[in-house]
Amino acid sequence: MDRKHSQHLYNEACEHIVGGVNSPSRSFKGVGGGVPVFMEKGNGAYLYDVDGSTYIDYLGAYGPIITGHAHPHITQVVTRAAENGVLYGTPTVLENRFAKMLKEAIPSLEKVRFVNSGTEAVMTTIRVARAYTGRTKIVKFSGSYHGHSDLVLVAAGSGPATLGSPDSAGVTENTAEEVITVPFNDTQALQDVLDKWGDDIAAVLVEPIVGNFGIVEPAEGFLEQVNEAAHDTGALVIYDEVITAFRFTYGGAQDIYGVKPDMTAMGKIIGGGLPIGAYGGRVDIMENVAPLGPAYQAGTMSGNPVSISAGIACLEVLGQDGVYEHLDHLGKRLEDGLSHIIKEHSIPAVINRRCGALTLFFTDRKVTDYDGADESDGELFKTFFHLMLDQGINLAPSKYEAWFLTTAHTEADIDQTIEAARHAFSQIEK
Ligand code: PLP
């Protein structure tokens, strides 16, 4: 595939934009380097690059695109919203409408607040949890990404039940010491931490289905145990549903498992592809937020009519009959096809899938936590990624990410993807 124009634009980007990209995950650092493909158009399941090549897209812009690119309903609604003026700095009827839609879909959201990104949403839930409990420490699970605010850019300490260490330059040791990281799906490790620091812990922060070291589901009873253990010590439970809200069902992952958190952070899909975040939860907790309470949170762009309109339009599409059945059907077809290829070859690989989201890990053991994902073979993934890209299949350039299907993908797209994977496996095996 010719990528001359992408190469040229990337060289230019590197002169003006730090690292040539506006988010590090877009660079090809995780797949042995190379030139990120510059896309100029998206339509349905496809992206079109500046050199004239077409790709079947499974990146989905890292999650927000679930109805396909340039979905006609969302495009029309966004255009109309822009024509009415993009920002007023006053409340609008759209915000009321969207808040009611979210509350109906996810009943634990007794009150909500709109912000501009998943990062803001998570960051604020932590502030509110601290305000409510009067405590400072947070427990999170290793490998989960919760945005780029200081407090959640913290890695596990040197052993179980130790305090964290900064995962990014610029995050202070003092900040890192407010965060304790335990393995996902490990209730004993969580209990140990709560036994040791229980009185200091404001909240346990968890992705109810992990999307950030691949798709990893909670073990049976895990979420119930998180709730029980946290509440026993007086800590709150915050669900980060930035990836999972409206991904697998018309609601949150919490609605699939029937377990209620105290607060939830959302983003991605709820903006229909435009910048958004939202958080919400129990009314007695949410009423700690300004102007009602002492926990300050604000935003010039928050609740802007264009993002809110896109979110409403996206949920209107997702609320139609059969949407999630269709995503599940396509996801199963892709999983079955890939599983077949794995059996035909001697390359160790396993698949984790829920509905229209899956991850192919190059390992022979079931992946249930970050260590499992981390141990999967990055070299094999790099080779596979480039072989797929060269056949017009756009995957996320990292072994830790998911493949996201959209309502626009067809069985023919899936079959073409499976054939590309078959070719890639054969090339790898040579
Ligand atoms: N939480 C999770 C689970 C995410 O996956 C992400 C982004 O990938 C975030 C939070 C941060 O969201 P944003 O990139 O919109 O700030």
Image (cartoon, grey):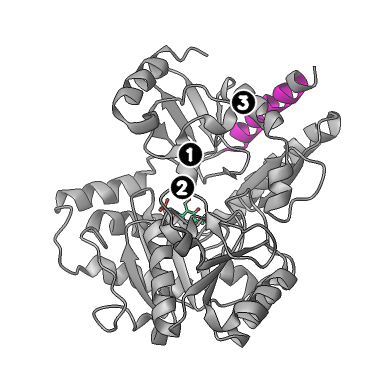
Residue 67 is tagged as 2
Q: Nearer the viewer, mark 2 or mark 3?
A: 3
360 or 183, which is in the foreground?
Answer: 183
* C-beta proximity under 8 Å, tags 3 and 1: no
Range covered by the magenta-colored residues: 410-426
Residue 388 is tagged as 3
Image-quadrant location for residue 314: bottom left
Residue 198 placed where, x, y %?
Answer: 60, 81
Mark 2 crowd level (few <14, some 14–19, many ≥20, 10 Å Cα): many
Q: CA distance from mark 3 to mark 1?
A: 18 Å
Mark 3 crowd level (few <14, some 14–19, many ≥20, 10 Å Cα): many
Secondary structure, mark 3, is helix
Secondary structure, mark 2, is loop
Q: Quadrant of the C terminus?
A: top right
Placement of 357 over or under 185, stated as above or below: above
Mark 1 within 8 Å of ligand 1, using the beta carbon: yes
Residue 34 placed where, x, y %?
Answer: 51, 22
Query: Three-letter amino acid code at disc 1?
Result: Ser
Query: Three-letter amino acid code at disc 2?
Result: Thr
Q: Nearer the viewer, mark 3 or mark 1?
A: 1
Q: Residue at x 32, y 66 (%)?
A: 114
26 or 234, which is in the foreground?
Answer: 234
Q: CA distance from mark 2 to mark 3?
A: 23 Å
Nearer the N terminus, badge 1 or badge 2?
A: 1
Secondary structure, mark 1, is helix
Q: Which residue is mark 1?
A: 25
Q: CA distance from mark 1 to mark 2?
A: 22 Å
Nearer the N terminus, badge 3 or badge 1?
A: 1
* C-beta proximity under 8 Å, tags 2 and 3: no
Instruction: Report the side of 257 relative to 394 (left or right).
Output: right
Query: Three-letter amino acid code at disc 3?
Result: Met
